[in-house]
Amino acid sequence: MPLFISDLLGWLENTALAAAIRQSLWLYPALEIVHITGIVILVGAAFMFDLRLLGFSKSLSIFGLSRHLLPWSRKALLLVIPSGILLFMTNSKTLGIDPTFWLKMFLLVIAALNVLVFHKLLFKPKSDAQNQELPFSTKISALVSITVWVAIIACGRLLAY
């Protein structure tokens, strides 16, 4: 790892905020709870939508489901991102050299790209179409989403060991 990155990670880990989180009896566990709650909301909503794209619950409108579930995923990012950054700060030197952490970050980029491609290129919802037929590529995107989110969660859990 380049020296400037190592220095940056060391500085980050030694900030007063990171030290306060590490030294607090309740702050680190509270951040973990917030992070996990955000993941449950984000990934739970994404999974339900992905399962619908894969053909489950065909009686539910894809348009209606997207309008209901996807805002929850977006709002959950307000929990996941700040809590994840704060958790990272407390142990940034160790995490910065952990391949599992970097695999998780890479997978998060893949998940974000999948969402971007899905919403910009593949998914053109029609409010009046109860059971609109979607291209096969939306099923591929749903499978990628489910697979990547399971891998991200696995990486997150592996970081604890």
Image (tube, rainbow, N blue to C red):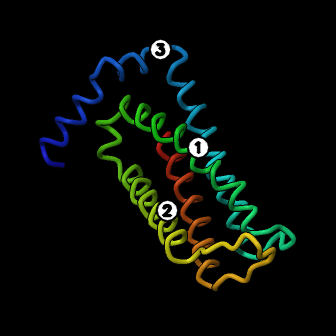
Q: Residue 60 carries which label?
A: none
Per the image, the residue denoted by label 1 is 76
Q: Which residue is drawn at 80% across and 77% down?
A: 131
- Near-viewer residue (111 or 130): 130
Q: Is residue 93 left or right of residue 29?
A: left
Circle 2 SS class:
helix
Q: Image quadrant of residue 92?
A: top left
Q: Which mark is residue 24?
A: 3
Q: Residue at x 83, y 73 (%)?
A: 58
Residue 161 appears in the picture as rendered:
no
Indicate which label's residue lies in the foreground, 3 or 2: 2
Crowd around label 1: few <14 · some 14–19 · many ≥20 (10 Å)? many
Per the image, the residue denoted by label 2 is 111
Q: Which amino acid does label 3 sit on?
A: Ser
Whole-Å distance between the Cαs marked 3 and 2? 33 Å
- Near-viewer residue (20 or 115): 115
Which of the two labelled residues, at mark 3 and mark 2, occupies the earlier sequence position?
3
Image height of 82 relative to 100, above or below: above
Q: Which amino acid does label 2 sit on?
A: Ala
Q: Residue furthest left?
A: 3
